[in-house]
Image (tube, rainbow, N blue to C red):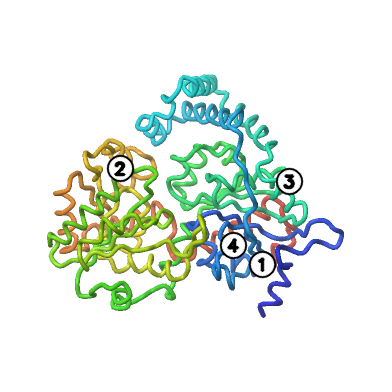
Amino acid sequence: MPEQSLLDSMGAVAGGCRPSSDGGASEGSILLLSTSLLTDRILLYTRAIEVLASRIPVRVWTLSAHLPGLWDGVPACVEPYPKVHPFREFPFNHLRRVNEAAWDYRLRPVSRISMDRHFGKYRTSPYLRFLKLMGMGLGAARLETWFEARLERLLLRYPRSPEATARFAECRPSIVVSTGPYQFNDPGVVAAAKLAGIPVVAYIPSFDNITTKNRLVFTYDAFIVWSEDQKRQLEAFYPSAREVPVYAVGAPQYDVFFQERFHQSRSEFCAEAGLREDRAIILYALGSPNLLKGEADGAVEFARWVAQGRFGDAQLIVRPHPVFDNGELHDRLAGFGPRVLLQRVSGVQAGNVRSQDVGAIREWVNSFRHADVVVNLSSTVAIDAALCDRPVVNLDYDPAPGSPQTPLIRDINHVWSHFSPVAGSGAVWLVSRPEELVHAVRTYLERPELHREERRRMVEQVCGKVDGRAGDRFAQAILDAALATHAVDPSASRKWMQ
């Protein structure tokens, strides 16, 4: 279909969508919300929007709408994300803390109990301890469901996004899809949608969200998750999820690893990166610094070992987390010579908003495809590497001076619900001190086939079906949810299924 006729069919006009002839909303569209580069890349680089747009008009509200060229060619009406305000601390956030404590008491989630023990957020003031005790009392009385239902009604009445409310009044979608239900922005828009009577689907974007993040307080009309394991977790943590559709579709962000357009030969990748293709490549990939503070120290120490020749003539790529790439490692790694490379992975950026263009995705994919060994500290990086059948060494200690967070790291690896199955799967080599790290990397460089079958099984357990078509299933789940919630005329289903 020519570009203009496609836009016409979506009802898109400059600055928004076309209102209906009666002055009300233009129904019959799907609205996708995205506030992170981690979910932007699903919408930009999988077939999800393409599949949706072939059946129903698509709109996207995203923080990255203004980034030059990023959304060019996407078959959707892309608009800036509406302004979202925070809740007032009292009473809203205080009551949310009570609700958290009530459910933690009832569910006894091992990951959150561990976090509370290590960070002690409720030991900071007598008042916060009082809120926790109040929540524990509700949990002991089995009143957590009763309390959460009333809290949801209270939170819905607080207008966090008047702009979203106004947009829905002018241009009402048939269904809203939140790709960041645990983040700051999406719940503000979700509340506006629910008050307008618009069904909302929540996509759980990572395998740690359900068991480690603060609790979702809004109910949803459907959920999309990666795997059947994640579906079971969701239904255990959120009893209301047992009453609505939950679709296990795989992990859509990994579709790019199956797309030839992002593949480079080893020689092409090395030439672009300034590396030698005839030498081994070790990838030290960092996770989020919000939880574990010492990863950068570990990367610097490892770079020193590479420069000293402890791994022969192997080369090192240090890859920051794409959300937290601020260049702070540049000076610390500058003196280790040409065999140590620090990637800049932030992609396109304007102010505090960043996303990943095609070049950034290509670098991500090929960094893992061509790494000979990957070093990681208890993050999703282990999944990235195993997906590419790259040997993974996972630290079981804190590499920072004095190792202050080693007890927390050992809890993550051996207790936390999302990562202990990964660490215990045999797919990653756990190392408890620097000498073991050196030995594991050397062994994997010599025998990369070790633990291959364990890596394959672990990826399937965490991600569900891994075939490069999770984005298609993500789109189909949205369409199915729209039918299940009567967001659209069921007679449209024949067209969708063609």
Left or right: where 240 falls relative to 324: right
Q: Position of residue 11 (x, y in %)?
A: 74, 67
Vertical relation: 407 (above or below) 375: above
Measured in 3D between alpha carbons, the distance from the residue under mark 1 to the one under mark 4, in whole angstroms, is 23 Å
Residue 413 tag number: 2
Asked whether disc 3 touches disc 2, contact meaning CB atoms under 8 Å apart, the reply is: no
> In this orientation, which residue lies closer to the viewer: 152 or 141?
152
Measured in 3D between alpha carbons, the distance from the residue under mark 4 to the one under mark 2, in whole angstroms, is 38 Å
**Which mark's residue is nearer the viewer, 3 or 4?**
4
Vertical relation: 399 (above or below) 474: above
Residue highlighted by disc 4:
65
Asked whether disc 3 touches disc 1, contact meaning CB atoms under 8 Å apart, the reply is: no
Residue 197 tag number: 3
> In this orientation, which residue lies closer to the viewer: 346 or 95?
346
Residue drawn 17% across the image and 54% down it = 440
Q: What residue type is labelled 1?
A: Arg
- Mark closest to the chain's N terminus, 2 or 1: 1
Question: Helix or strand or loop: what does disc 2 sit on?
Answer: helix
Residue 235 tag number: none
Residue 249 visible in the current orientation? no
